[in-house]
Amino acid sequence: MKRILCCVVYALCGIPLFAQSHVEVLAKPDNTVDFCLAGVDAPGTRTVLLNLTGLTNCDHPAGEYPFVVSNDGVFLTLRPHDSRIEIGYDYTYRVLDVWLNAPADRAFVYRLPCSAARPAAVAVREKQGVAGPSKDFSACCFACEKGDTVYAVRRGVVTQVRYGEREPGAGAGGDSALRNSSLYVEHADGSVARYGMPEGANLLVKAGEVVFPDTPLASAGDGSTSFSVSLFRVVLNSGKNAGLYFVLFEYFRPLFATDRGNTRLLSGESYRPVVTRELVGREMTAKEAKRYERGKRR
């Protein structure tokens, strides 16, 4: 018997997890069975948690398996031991709009998101331990003025643009409790940068665009005083509150390239970014590097 039970993961604390995509199954004439991700209508990586049970005449063992998927298409093929007989199987699945348990590189060096025109004062907000769906919350807040540019910290794909979102870890009130807009950018190692934009910011990118460490994301508007950047990955929750939160947003403090060397920022200090060709281009493809060089020569 072939049974489908679809489980959906919902959004937590305003950070998007809900997956519009779904799994489809195709039984083929040669008695192989393809599992396909379908309905992908937004940028970014997804994780399919597929639980296979009741397998008969199959070369694949039963169990729950994570599949990291970026596009529509086949992500698993079951093959029969005896090609004359159909495979028996049951399955359930979840689709998450994130790379679950991604191998985020904590030694990676990021670009400071502010302009080199003057030093930027920094405030670091941290909250150790697990609070709701957040683990070891950390965000760097940068002072800014009208007209200042917010730059991407690393090459990645803009996966979400959100408005009126309460910043994770912020209190009930205060200057940074609610941002005019926020961007989520997914990086090659599965880490995600959340940019809490200043009030009245003019956004310069949209979902689906590839950005680089020298790409302007937004310009500060009237009344702007600060913006924030936080880095996190999404992990399975095995703690006491796993019944409430299936996953946790695990934050980490990044290394930034600054005039003081590669460092983790300290609250109350001021820093200037150091932007080199190597920092900007190290994750570019050959085609992206050529396009970037042509743009610099104009």
Image (spheres, grey):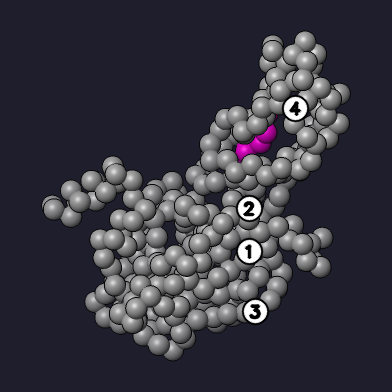
The mark nearer the N terminus, 1 or 2, is 2
Give the residue at x 65% y 31%.
76
Vertical relation: 222 (above or below) 102: below
Q: Secondary structure at mark 4?
A: loop
Residue 147 within the segment the image draws in magenta = no
Q: Which residues are magenta?
A: 20-24
Depth check, mark 4 against mark 3: the one in front is: 4
**What amino acid is labelled 2 in the image?**
Leu
97 left or right of 148 in image: right
- Separation of marks 4 and 1 at Cα, in angstroms: 35 Å
The mark nearer the N terminus, 3 or 1, is 3
**What amino acid is labelled 1 in the image?**
Phe
The residue carrying pointer 2 sits among few (fewer than 14), some (14 to 19) or many (20 or more) residues within 10 Å by Cα, namely: many
Question: According to the image, label 3 marks what residue?
Answer: 128
- Separation of marks 3 and 1 at Cα, in angstroms: 13 Å
Q: Secondary structure at mark 1?
A: strand
Q: Quadrant of residue 120?
A: bottom left
- Separation of marks 2 and 3 at Cα, in angstroms: 21 Å
Give the residue at x 56% y 37%.
40
Percent x, y for residue 54? 86, 31
Q: Which mark is residue 59?
A: 4
Depth check, mark 4 against mark 1: the one in front is: 4
**What amino acid is labelled 4 in the image?**
Asp
Percent x, y for residue 281? 30, 56
Residue 23 within the segment the image draws in magenta = yes
The one nearer the camera, 72 or 13, is: 72
Question: According to the image, label 2 marks what residue?
Answer: 100
Vertical relation: 246 (above or below) 114: above
Q: Are marks 3 and 1 in contact (CB under 8 Å)?
A: no
